[in-house]
Image (cartoon, rainbow, N blue to C red):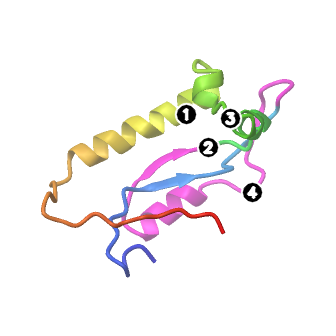
Amino acid sequence: MFRKVEVPVIGVVENMSVHICSNCGHEEPLFGHGGGERIAEEYDTILLGQLPLHMTIREQTDSGSPTVVAEPESEVALRYRDIARRVGAELSTRERNLGGTISSVSVAEH
């Protein structure tokens, strides 16, 4: 879809890649393994990272304190930060398009 409307794709982030047990920390790929890699390869892009299916992500986000703020040194926060570093690294290799237009977005209550 993004390529059809000429929106550059930086890469793939696989959501719910593994389940991390909140009691023991065991990781298990509930929905299979390697989906993010396959999609990245199929669309000729990179896998930026894999986020787990973990209760704290939902709880902290719902409370208004994302994991990287609530528990900045946690394993989940480290995954988010690693993805952010990869995005930054990928963007640093791209040619800048300073002549392009920036889309306008408006939000309104109805």
Sequence-earlier tag: 4 or 1:
4
Residue 44 among magenta residues: yes
Q: Residue at x 38, y 40 (%)?
A: 86
Q: Residue at x 63, y 63 (%)?
A: 109
Q: CA distance from mark 2 to mark 4?
A: 13 Å
- Determine whether the residue tagged by mark 4 lies in a helix, strand or loop: loop
Amino acid bearing label 1: Arg
Q: CA distance from mark 4 to mark 1?
A: 19 Å
Q: Which residue occupies 33% across, 67% down?
A: 103
Percent coordinates x, y for residue 61 in the rendering: 69, 38
Quadrant in which the C terminus appears: bottom right
Nearer the observer: mark 3 or 2; the answer is 3
Q: Do residues under tags 4 and 1 come within 8 Å of each other at their CB atoms?
A: no
Q: Which residues are magenta?
A: 22-51
Circle nearer the viewer, 4 or 3 = 3
Q: Quick one: label 4 or label 3, which is nearer the N terminus?
A: 4
First along the sequence among labels 2 and 4: 4
Check disc 2 and give the amino acid type. Answer: Leu
- Residue bearing the label numbered 1: 79
> Which label belongs to residue 64?
3
Of all residues, the one furthest to the front in this rendering is 110
Disc 2 or disc 4, which is closer to the eye? 2
Q: Position of residue 10 (x, y in %)?
A: 36, 56
Q: Which residue is mark 2?
A: 51
Specify the label residue 31 is tagged with: 4
Please give left or right for residue 49 compared with residue 98 in the image.
right
Q: CA distance from mark 3 to mark 2?
A: 19 Å
Q: Secondary structure at mark 3?
A: loop
